[in-house]
Image (cartoon, rainbow, N blue to C red):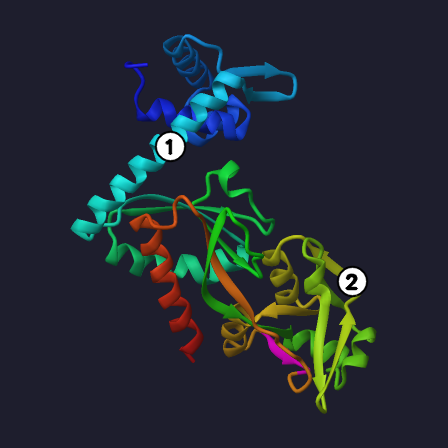
Amino acid sequence: MRHLDFDDMHLFARVAELGTLSAVAREREVPVSQVSRTLARIEKACGARLIHRSTHGLAPTAEGETFLQYCRRIIGTLDELEGEFAQQTQQASGWVRVAASTVMAEYLLVPSLASLHQRHPRLCVEFQVEDRLVDMAHDGIDIAIRTGVPPTDTVVARQIGALGRRLYATPGYLQAHGTPRHPDELRRHELITNSAVPMLNRWPFQSKGQSSMIAAEACWRSDSTGITTKLALHGLGISRMATLVAEPLVRQGLLVPVLADFVDDQPSPVYAVTLTSRHRLPKIRACIDHWTEWFEKTRTTP
């Protein structure tokens, strides 16, 4: 036991969480054989078999579960200690792994990185970009940027802004197919929808104080918000898009609002989600504080 260090404990915790040596090797950018040797050394130092190997993957043994609990406790304590020193020196540093959708990453987070680096030059950010909801513990995510997060006991969700959605199409599409004057006319148009989040395909409208909803039937669809944006920009149809993305494109003349007098944009809160064990770390707080300010600046910039 005396020959084990913090990195050994962190590696074991990731093996237990990810369930494969190859996943840990990819995460660390080292050969699988190196991870395997380290795990064997840890088991030898503990004098017990800590990981059960089967065709279904890796899982901790009873002794491994005990060791894992201690590893997590020590990792958490060291993170808190790092936070205390960082707080005293006002220095946020280290890697922060962030999960976000394509749209959030491309249009909100990436443009904010230069100013984040100016404020915290010792911070480094790694993005995991996809529309699906991630398992933060399993994927090693520090911050997940999400909309409409249900509260749970294992995460802390802080609202950093709000995101509205409206309908848009290119001038070329509207010239070729006509501009709808009423939501009922959408049935005659090519629509673009999201196959990953069906809720986004229920398009809300307001007219004379009355609310209505249309279930959009797509001619084109994708599980990626980035691709649905590209489909719209290529003039393939009308899409319900985040105003954060679309309004700058409107100002460039690339998109035109559709049914602006009818659409109910129903702004959804945008949250920065962290695990309860990590939300107080200075490097995480620094990112979330910065993105809250950046979101507000982006919202108010004409």
Residue 158, by quadrant, is bottom left
Report the label total: 2
What amino acid type should be assigned to the residue bearing mark 1? Arg
Residue 147, horizontal then vertical, whole percent: 55, 61
Q: Position of residue 104 (x, y in %)?
A: 50, 59
Q: In what element is the residue under mark 2?
A: loop
Question: In the image, which disc is placed on residue 73?
Answer: 1
Residue labelled with disc 2 = 219
Which residue is rendered at x = 52% and y = 49% of the image?
Answer: 153
Label placed on residue 216: none
For the residues labelled 1 and 2, say whether their Cβ atoms are less than 8 Å apart: no
- Crowding at mark 1 (Cα within 10 Å: few <14, some 14-19, many 20+): few
Residue 29 showing in the rendered view: no
Q: Nearer the viewer, residue 152 or 130?
A: 152
Report the span colored magenta: 255-259
- Answer whether residue 138 is visible to the viewer in this image: yes
Q: Secondary structure at mark 1?
A: helix
> In the image, residue 113 lies at what x, y percent?
35, 56
Which quadrant is home to the N terminus?
A: top left
In the rendered image, which quarter contains the C terminus? Answer: bottom left
